[in-house]
Image (cartoon, helix red, strand yellow):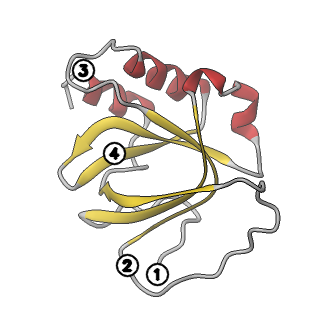
Amino acid sequence: MKTRNGFVSNSSSSSFVILGVEVKLNDIDVQDLKSKEYEYVAESGMQGESGPIFVEIKNKKMLDLLKRAHDGEFDNLDNNVHAYKAYYCSFSEGGDGETIDISNFPKKIEVYSGEADQCSFALDVDEMEAMYKGEY
């Protein structure tokens, strides 16, 4: 099983598991993007060939783009952008289970899992904006 040190994007689809909590995009503080304890990821509202496209929210530019998408600026998506404060993410092509230490996680944590498109986490802000505009 591949465990993310960076994001995996080398298969037609990847299974994903996110341990965290869903948050509103407007509640994400830009300073929080620098945290070492968690990261922010988002289901972009775009569907790829093999599932939803996920992106890592690393900077203000990506956060602002996702907010614009969520607010309905782009015609070719359903404005259904979901953001997660993730304490653990794993994107893999399958394989055996993995043991993780959750002792430093908050007491209330949720599990999100499913299939993600192969280009998930490989797209930068400019590529995502081009996709939202139907230019990619």
Name the residue: 65% across, 28% down: 28
**Horizontal side, residue 112 vs residue 23: left or right:** left
Amino acid at the residue labelled 3? Lys
Mark before the other along the chain sequence, 2 or 3: 2
Identify the residue position indicated by label 4 in the image.
53
Q: Reply above or below: 136 against 49.
A: above
Amino acid at the residue labelled 4? Ile
Q: What whole-number distance in Å separates the C-alpha atoms at marks 3 and 1?
A: 35 Å
Q: Position of residue 53 (x, y in %)?
A: 33, 45
Tell me, yes or no, whether the two marked residues, 1 and 4, touch with CB atoms within 8 Å: no
Mark before the other along the chain sequence, 2 or 4: 4
Q: Which residue lies furthest to the front in this view?
A: 108
Q: Name the disc covering residue 1, or none.
A: 1
Q: How crowded is mark 2: few (under 14 residues within 10 Å), some or many (20 or more)?
A: few
Mark before the other along the chain sequence, 3 or 1: 1
Identify the residue position indicated by label 2 in the image.
94
Name the residue: 23% across, 64% down: 12
Amino acid at the residue labelled 2? Gly
